[in-house]
Amino acid sequence: MELTRRGAIRLAGVAGLAATTGAVLAAVPASPALASQYLWLWCHQCQGLWFGGNYISGACPATGITGHSLAGSGAYTLPTDSDNVPGQRGWVWCNRCQGLWYGRNSTRGACPAGPGGHDSAGSGGYTPMNNSGGGQGDWRWCRQCQGMWFAANGTGGACPAPGTAGHSLVGSGNYTLPTTQDLSWGQPDWRWCNRCQGLWYSANRTFGACPAGPGGHHWDPDADDYAPDVNSGSGQGQWRWCHQCQGMWFGANGTGGACPAPGTAGHSLAGNYHLDLWN
């Protein structure tokens, strides 16, 4: 691909992205949470840990709330069993509420999505560090719901177990979760489409909608992998990801423009990407 555009976008390197406070980024698909991946988030409503990389916000046990919130959260990257780190195995993702829960006890706990407890179908095994490791501490196991929650805010949050006034830290270790706050390398997996010439996010299980015609954006395994800065950077901000077409567009002109996805009135707005301009 000939680099003849005005905005300079960093090619992806060895580092990935992390979400900063309140960030909404181009997401991985509504599918099982994958191993060693960012976008595990804290929900300030229930204090629980949940996977924010899907299009859904899961189920939050806080009264009157329909889903988890990412407001105020950083991005956490969970080690997995395949990473062979000296943490505690047995933690899994719940495909009902999107939360992390401990699956090696004789109970499936309490899931805020409804009766029956958590469901780990499709999940890999996670290995958070227990009483050791770098990152943010004071993450705890709740023996009532079996979920993981953050205990350093002076509140037990909201626990989905019936008759409880909040999460419990009785019997829990002190888990440490790695945080990824360095955005200097941006978010990888942005690609050039040789059909419409646009930049689109390729890490989802969809080719999006391409204005050049049916079939979505063109996937070229030999194309460069771009990593634009997100939520920081010295370039021009207000570039956004559209989850409808998977493309990047400029969101500061007071219009959603024209999105090629059928039935849409304009692009959807997520993330705040910064593109360097040539001097």
Image (cartoon, helix red, strand yellow):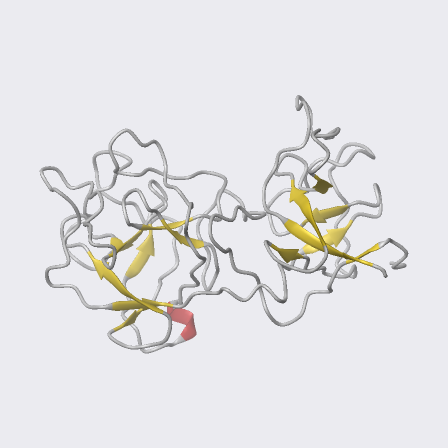
Q: Is residue 129 visible?
A: yes
- Pick whichever, 279 or 271, lies toward us: 279
Q: Is residue 128 visible?
A: no
Task: Please determine whether, in this image, residue 2 is positioned above or below residue 218.
Answer: below
Task: Please determine whether, in this image, residue 110 is positioned above or below residue 203.
Answer: above
Q: Position of residue 255 (x, y in %)?
A: 71, 29
- Pick whichever, 137 or 110, lies toward us: 137
> Residue at horizontal 37%, vertical 71%?
135
Q: Position of residue 4 (x, y in %)?
A: 90, 56
Please give the count of numbered marks on the rendered protein. 0
Q: Position of residue 78 (x, y in %)?
A: 40, 64
Quadrant containing the N terminus in the rendered view:
bottom right
> Residue at horizontal 39%, vertical 58%?
124
Quadrant containing the C terminus in the rendered view:
bottom right
> Residue at horizontal 30%, vertical 45%?
119
> Residue at horizontal 36%, vertical 41%?
68
Q: Position of residue 240 (x, y in %)?
A: 66, 43
Q: Quadrant of residue 225?
A: bottom right
Left or right of residue 100: residue 8: right
Task: Please determine whether, in this image, residue 115 is positioned above or below residue 278.
Answer: above
- Pick whichever, 14 or 230, lies toward us: 230
Q: Quadrant of residue 62?
A: top left
- Pick whichever, 232 or 270, lies toward us: 232
Left or right of residue 147: residue 21: right
